[in-house]
Image (cartoon, rainbow, N blue to C red):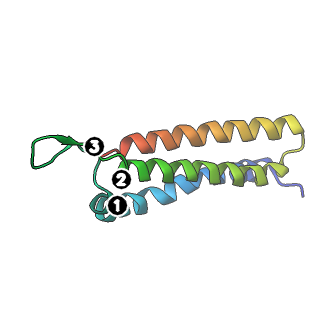
Amino acid sequence: MRLPMTRKIILLALPLLLFVLLVTPYQYINSTYLVQRFGCGCPQINASGEIVENNFNANTVTAIVWSCVALIVTFIGIALSRLLSSKWMRALYIVLLFCTSLAISQSLIQSMMWN
């Protein structure tokens, strides 16, 4: 299937749109449900005045969710890489998409941390 170069570029960049589409719904779910269910990751003090460490909290769920989204974007990119003609272009595209997904994911994780 021969596509014009502009359409091909748009199709190859399309998986990154998943991050844009999921940010707002996830922020809503994170603030209304996940923090109440798992805690915010803030240091908590029990009745005897000791700091209680919450090892699994909303920050952990956020890291898991955005890491999974980065992997899903990469797998979609692997499927879309067939649009490229040469093997080295496919490999370069997949590596760049993976690195970009990780960078976006890390940025979102940092911005959504509860302190």
Name the disc covering residue 67, or none.
none
Residue 80 in the image, given as x and y percentages of width and height? 77, 53
Amino acid carrying mark 3 in the image: Glu
The numbered mark, 1 or 3, whose residue comes first in the sequence reads 1
Circle 2 is placed at which residue position?
58
Residue 25 in the image, given as x and y percentages of width and height? 42, 63
The numbered mark, 3 or 2, whose residue comes first in the sequence reads 3
Q: Is residue 38 left or right of residue 89?
A: left
Q: Residue at x 60, y 50 (%)?
A: 16
Q: Secondary structure at mark 3?
A: loop
Answer with the quarter of the image where residue 109 lies.
Answer: top left
Are the residues tagged 2 and 1 within 8 Å (C-beta)?
yes
Circle 3 is placed at which residue position?
53
Q: Secondary structure at mark 1?
A: helix
Residue 11 in the image, given as x and y percentages of width and height? 71, 54
Alpha carbons under labels 3 and 2: distance apart: 13 Å
Q: Is residue 62 left or right of residue 39?
A: right
Q: Residue at x 78, y 54 (%)?
A: 79
Q: Which of the pair 112/53 is nearer the observer?
A: 53
Alpha carbons under labels 2 and 1: distance apart: 5 Å
Q: Residue at x 84, y 45 (%)?
A: 84
Residue 82 in the image, given as x and y percentages of width and height? 84, 51
Circle 1 is placed at which residue position?
34
Q: Residue at x 30, y 47 (%)?
A: 54
